[in-house]
């Protein structure tokens, strides 16, 4: 079928739905919901047989839903209504939640139900639950709803008639009054629930050091405590620790209320001057500087089981600043000195990596200079992984991966991805950025020269299964995150114990030596950086403009042509 995806932005769920529907042979076009007239024009041009809205922030105009079947993805159980469905579920501690696919009508979230899915809730941020449980449930429900529509025999049930043991209710937009934290009374659990429910957007309005700001990215602390509730009692790398009535919580990111152009940044970066008299709480020790220390905030940690080392790096939204790249490089070098035969780069649960840290770059005195420092830092890390010859290396993608993060993963000997993970192995969406991380060395041998050019040009998301088919990913493993980690550990253990390990390592060294003789790795880097120097310092400001709009979340003014295929010259509806 011809299916139009109408969405506020091409977010992770919209990308997942696009990938899954495309894999099933549907012809897809995307239109951003900018204005009624724009959506109406898209419908007239594409003439869709079905419209699916995975992510909207306002109602579809009657001029469209009255003449076309429009399926809306609502992140709530059947009967739930309102714009803060997931926020309320997290803050209220719902043990179970769900996703409903319903038909657009004149009644907000009140149309007939085409499909629904339920899932168990976990204690996590809204963004994390959305990327995992909501995404999986929504994708399953959308695919079922599309099949039912295609059959022509299914009649959707009114919300009140849909079969469900627990029914949702109408709830209003959650405002800051409902999110407010009382540091003198609220428990750590209650505060964390508020932070989790507001994570991503809009954050919790509060104050730090007497300055109004929004708080994001909360984390439990089980060992450090003390000090009056609400006081900042310690800091570590990018996060700060605040005392509560029964313990303490880490705050990873904040957005200042003034000036109005402020954007989300690491808390310790924003309040660096105020932290001068606050004690640091480092994790490092001479024995195991990157080993886990229990329930505490830790963006880099190392675990070891048998002959396998697991290096975790859980950076917020997958962004890797200059310092984070340097710290991860130090952790990598330390891990290579441990008595292990295989090193698994685990990334984080939500993201493996999305490459350089655009927010930190935007906040720098010279964004061009910080871009240059950041790309060189991540290149140093990629080079170390490529050149490591003492162990086999595996990139285990638990979460999504984009831009330079994809090629940092491909620097490993093997890439294993969780089913459901999305990859965006291209750079051009960020103002025609050329990119580095040795992609010109790593990508063509995997997908071919033409395949590499197409991947960079098309700028579309790739599922884990599609990554395997293209040759970019070596294996697509279990979709369930826990099952994925078990499978990764088992496979890595088998690699470490395999009798042909020594031969594989020798072959790895020989390939690298042959590649180096044919064209030094430094030459690939120099050529990539020459292109990036033009991006960062040249006359074309496209990268800087695109980064500004990305960081400041500027509302979309048009839909990129690689998504809105109906707006290409020469487009016509197939007979």
Image (spheres, helix red, strand yellow):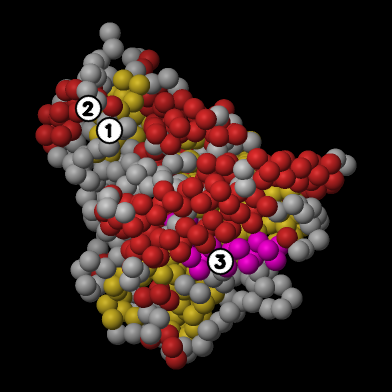
In what element is the residue under mark 3?
helix
* Within-10-Å neighbours for mark 3: few <14, some 14–19, many 20+: some
* Within-10-Å neighbours for mark 1: few <14, some 14–19, many 20+: few
The residue indicated by pointer 1 is 561
Membership of 315 in magenta stretch:
yes
Membership of 86 in magenta stretch:
no
In this picture, residue 155 sits left or right of residue 38: right
Question: What mark, if any, has residue 326 been given in the picture?
Answer: 3
Residue 48 visible to the viewer: yes
Badge 2 or badge 1: first in the primary sequence? 1
User: Disc 3 and disc 1: Cα gap in Å?
Assistant: 37 Å
In what element is the residue under mark 2?
helix
User: Disc 2 and disc 3: Cα gap in Å?
Assistant: 44 Å
Q: Are marks 2 and 1 in contact (CB under 8 Å)?
A: yes
Q: Which is more toward the observer, 2 or 507?
A: 507
Question: What mark, if any, has residue 567 been given in the picture?
Answer: 2
Mark in the foreground, 3 or 1: 3
Q: Residue 257 in the image: state x and y as whole percent.
A: 25, 72
Residue 361 sits in quarter: bottom left
User: Disc 2 and disc 1: Cα gap in Å?
Assistant: 7 Å
| Residue plotted at (25% across, 15% down) | 573
Q: Which residues are drawn in magenta?
A: 314-335
Q: Are marks 2 and 3 in contact (CB under 8 Å)?
A: no
Badge 2 or badge 3: first in the primary sequence? 3
Q: Residue 289 in the image: state x and y as whole percent.
A: 67, 73
Q: Which is more toward the observer, 366 or 2?
A: 366
Mark in the foreground, 2 or 3: 3
Q: Which is more toward the observer, 64 or 179?
A: 64
């Amino acid at each position: 079928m011809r299916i139009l995806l109408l969405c506020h932005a091409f977010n992770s769920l919209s990308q997942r739905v696009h990938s899954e529907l495309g894999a099933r042979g549907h012809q897809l076009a995307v239109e951003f919901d900018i204005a009624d007239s724009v959506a109406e024009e898209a419908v007239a041009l594409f003439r869709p047989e079905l419209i699916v809205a995975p992510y909207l922030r306002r109602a579809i105009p009657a001029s469209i839903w009255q003449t076309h079947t429009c399926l809306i993805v609502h992140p709530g159980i059947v009967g739930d209504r309102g714009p803060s469905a997931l926020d309320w579920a997290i803050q209220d501690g719902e043990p179970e939640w769900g996703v409903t696919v319903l038909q657009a009508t004149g009644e907000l979230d009140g149309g007939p139900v085409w499909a629904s899915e339920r899932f168990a809730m976990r204690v996590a941020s809204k963004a994390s639950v959305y990327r995992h449980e909501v995404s999986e449930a929504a994708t399953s429900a959308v695919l079922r709803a599309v099949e039912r529509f295609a059959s022509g025999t299914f009649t959707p049930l009114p919300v009140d008639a849909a079969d469900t043991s627990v029914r949702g209710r109408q709830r209003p937009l959650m405002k800051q009054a409902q999110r407010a934290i009382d540091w003198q009374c609220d428990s750590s659990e209650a505060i964390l629930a508020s932070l989790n429910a507001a994570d991503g957007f809009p954050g919790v309005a509060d104050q730090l050091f007497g300055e109004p700001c929004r708080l994001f990215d909360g984390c439990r602390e089980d060992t450090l405590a003390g000090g009056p509730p609400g006081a900042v009692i310690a800091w570590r790398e990018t996060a700060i620790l605040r005392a509560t009535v029964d313990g303490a919580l880490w705050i990873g990111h904040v957005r200042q209320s003034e000036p109005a152009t402020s954007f989300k940044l690491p808390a310790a970066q924003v309040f660096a001057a105020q932290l001068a008299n606050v004690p640091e709480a480092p994790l490092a020790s001479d024995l195991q500087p990157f080993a886990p220390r229990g329930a505490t905030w830790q963006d880099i940690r190392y675990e070891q089981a048998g002959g396998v080392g697991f290096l975790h790096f859980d950076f917020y939204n997958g962004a890797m600043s200059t310092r984070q790249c340097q710290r991860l490089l130090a952790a990598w070098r330390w891990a290579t000195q441990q008595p292990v035969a295989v090193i698994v780069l685990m990334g984080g649960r939500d993201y493996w990596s999305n490459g350089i840290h655009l927010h930190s770059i935007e906040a720098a005195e010279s964004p061009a200079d910080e871009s240059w420092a950041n790309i060189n830092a991540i290149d140093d890390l990629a080079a170390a992984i490529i050149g490591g010859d003492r162990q086999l290396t595996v990139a285990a993608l638990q979460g999504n991966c984009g831009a330079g993060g994809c090629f940092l993963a491909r620097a490993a000997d093997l890439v294993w991805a969780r089913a459901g993970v999305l990859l965006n192995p291209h750079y051009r969406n960020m103002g025609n950025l050329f990119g580095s991380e040795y992609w010109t060395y790593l990508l063509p041998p995997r997908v071919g020269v033409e395949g590499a050019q197409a991947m960079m040009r098309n700028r579309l998301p790739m599922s884990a299964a599609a990554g395997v088919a293209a040759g970019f990913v070596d294996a697509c493993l279990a979709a369930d995150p826990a099952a994925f980690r078990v499978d990764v550990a088992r496979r890595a253990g088998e690699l470490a114990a395999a009798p042909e390990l020594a031969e594989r390592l020798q072959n790895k060294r020989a390939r690298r030596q042959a590649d180096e003789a044919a064209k030094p790795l430094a030459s690939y880097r120099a050529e990539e950086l020459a292109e990036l120097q033009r991006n960062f310092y040249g006359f074309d400001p496209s990268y800087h403009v695109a980064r500004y709009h990305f960081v400041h979340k500027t509302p979309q003014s048009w839909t990129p042509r690689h998504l809105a295929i109906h707006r290409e010259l020469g487009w016509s509806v197939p007979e």
